[in-house]
Image (cartoon, helix red, strand yellow):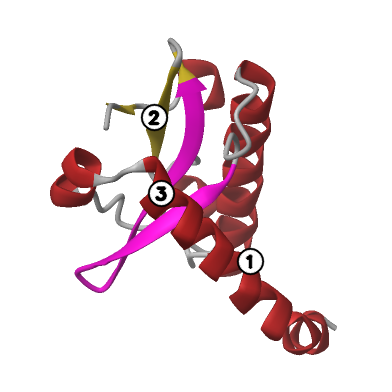
């Protein structure tokens, strides 16, 4: 499956941009900025194509985190857009071997997990 970088106008937040005046790193602000970045890329992907998976986020475990992608139909083919979040892990094997059926399964699994833990995230956000 073809994998693309995020368009320059949707660049990810820079790690060093979140230090306060005392030089301490503000992890919460960085998390918020990454969530906004992911949302912008997802919305951009939804506008680009007309595939049911456009804008959906898929993740694969990598190292101490995960590789994260947005699904988008680009040039008539379902493709992946690599999100440079966290350590910007990539999963070369997944990028080469992913199928539309696998992406659908991963999206459905993520949505079920989000629904299962929706009440929990509402409690922790408060």
SS under mark 1: helix
* Picture coordinates of residue 69, whole percent (x, y): 42, 45
Q: Which residue is mark 3?
A: 101
Q: Residue furthest right?
A: 126
Which quadrant does the C terminus fall into? bottom right
Mark before the other along the chain sequence, 1 or 2: 2
User: Is 80 on the left-hand or right-hand side of 27?
Assistant: left
Q: What is the span of residues highlighted in magenta in the rendered image?
A: 56-73
Check disc 3 and report its element: helix, strand or loop: helix
Which percent across, then down, holds residue 7? 46, 19
Dot 2: within a 10 Å radius of its alpha carbon, few (fewer than 14), some, or many (20 or more) residues?
Answer: many
Q: Which residue is denoted by mark 1 in the rendering? A: 111
Disc 2, disc 3: CB below 8 Å?
no
The residue at the point 60 percent across, 29 percent down is: 51
Secondary structure found at label 2: strand
Label 1 with label 3: CB-CB less than 8 Å: no
Q: Is residue 126 above or below residue 15?
A: below
Q: Nearer the viewer, residue 44 or 85?
A: 44
Is residue 58 in the magenta section? Answer: yes
Residue at image mark 2? 79
């Amino acid at each position: 499956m073809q994998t693309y970088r995020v368009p320059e106008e949707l660049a990810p937040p820079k790690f060093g941009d979140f230090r306060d005046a005392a030089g301490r790193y503000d992890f919460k602000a960085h998390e918020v900025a990454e969530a906004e970045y992911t949302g912008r890329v997802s919305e951009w992907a939804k506008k680009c194509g007309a595939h049911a998976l456009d804008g959906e986020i898929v993740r694969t475990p990598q190292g101490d985190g995960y590789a994260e992608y947005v699904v988008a139909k680009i040039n008539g083919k379902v493709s992946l857009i690599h999100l440079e979040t966290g350590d910007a892990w990539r999963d070369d094997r997944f990028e080469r071997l992913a199928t539309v059926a696998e992406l659908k399964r991963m999206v459905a699994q993520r949505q079920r997990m989000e629904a299962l833990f929706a009440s929990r995230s509402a409690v922790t956000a408060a």
